Amino acid sequence: MRIVIRYFFRTLRLVLTPFMLISEKLSTPKAVERLPEEQARVDEASRDLALYQFSACPFCIKVRKEMARLGLNVETRDAQHNAAHRAELEAGGGRIKVPCLLIRQDNGEDEWLYESDQIRSWLQKRFEPATAA
């Protein structure tokens, strides 16, 4: 019985994945507009970030949409199909759980941030442009 349940959910994932990815493409917001020098600073700061993710994970999609809205060029690493990225995630973060944002600090230390809401909150605090009053 356990194997039947396992294959049922694998098949369900295979069927739903294309719909989730198409939905992501259609509903991803436009990036905030910044002056070119501000965007260059954001691009430089986002070089120290990497998102470990699965392509069809709904929580990963939520984080990728926030990154798109903020206009961030963050490297995404597929921890589902790439064994090296999966091993890095387990070795550095301590567990294989996505989404996970790797933040390389200026002092050379790495911070591993799990949970989509925490990642989105950190990105917003760090990169949300100031609103004009």
Image: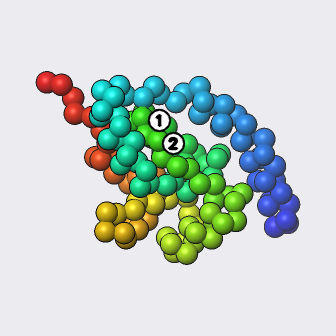
Residue 35 or residue 56, whichever sits in front: 35
Q: Quadrant of residue 10?
A: bottom right
Q: Residue at x 58, y 45 (%)?
A: 58
Q: Residue at point 41% right, 55% down?
A: 48
Q: Is residue 62 visible?
A: no
* Marks 2 and 1 in Cβ contact (< 8 Å): yes
Helix, strand or loop at label 1? It is helix
Q: Position of residue 23 (x, y in %)?
A: 62, 31
Task: Identify the image quadrant of the N terminus.
Answer: bottom right
In x, y percent, where is residue 33? 35, 25
Q: Which residue is mark 2?
A: 64
Q: Is the residue 96 above or below the residue 73 in the image?
A: below
Amino acid type at mark 1: Ala
- Rounded to the nearest whole Å, what is the CA distance between mark 2 and mark 1? 6 Å
Query: Disc 1 designates what residue?
Result: 68
Q: Secondary structure at mark 2?
A: helix
Q: Residues within 10 Å of mark 1 (few under 14, many from 20)?
A: some
> 112 or 17: nearer the eye?
112
Closer to us: 102 or 26: 102
